[in-house]
Image (spheres, rainbow, N blue to C red):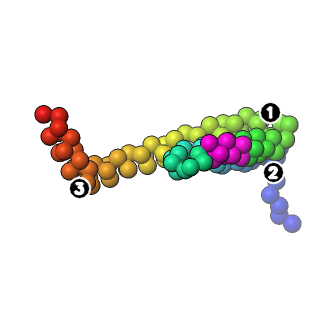
Amino acid sequence: MIGIEINDSQVIWSVIGWSLFAGILLGGIFYGGLWWTVTQRLAHPRAALWFVGGFIARMAIALGGIYWIAAGDWKKLAACMLGFFIGRLLVNGYSTRMKNTANLAQIDSPLASAQNSKDKTYAS
């Protein structure tokens, strides 16, 4: 029977790769949830409850996930934390792009141009 031989280093690298991927997911959930809470729930009547509840939920998911993924191995912990940081960078890039898109849409709208011309009239 023909089989595929897998050595120990291949197993270690695959486990580290999955830990990195899981860290990216956890970072995306944590920082994506933070971005969503700040942008969507700021005007809510009970905004403080959303912020505190969101913080507790995000911390529980992140810390529980990191603890479960690392399983006492420093290599998996390091890969997961690196992935968590990469997830932060991805969400930061996405949120910056969304903010720039919203600013461009606001500049191009007829209402914004009418408001800008009104502001210039009062400034003179």
Q: Quadrant of residue 23?
A: top right
**For this rendering, which residue is in front, 89 or 99?**
99
For the N terminus, give its image quadrant. Answer: bottom right
Q: Earlier in the sequence, mark 2 or mark 3?
A: 2
Secondary structure under the numbered disc 1 in the rendered image: helix
Q: Position of residue 86 (x, y in %)?
A: 60, 40
Q: Which residue is mark 3?
A: 110
State the extent of the magenta-drawn residues as a range: 48-58
Which is nearer the eye, 23 or 95? 95
Q: Nearer the viewer, mark 1 or mark 3?
A: 3
Image side of residue 94 versus residue 37, left or right: left
Q: Is residue 89 left or right of residue 70?
A: left
Q: CA distance from mark 2 to mark 3?
A: 63 Å
Q: In percent of the image, x 60 and y 48: which residue is there?
A: 46
- 57 is within the stretch colored magenta: yes
Q: Position of residue 68 (x, y in %)?
A: 82, 45
Which mark is drawn over residue 61? none
Task: Determine if the magenta segment contains residue 115.
Answer: no
Q: CA distance from mark 1 to mark 3?
A: 56 Å
Q: Secondary structure of the magenta portion, mostly?
A: helix
**Kind of residue at disc 2:** Ile
Residue bearing mark 2 = 6
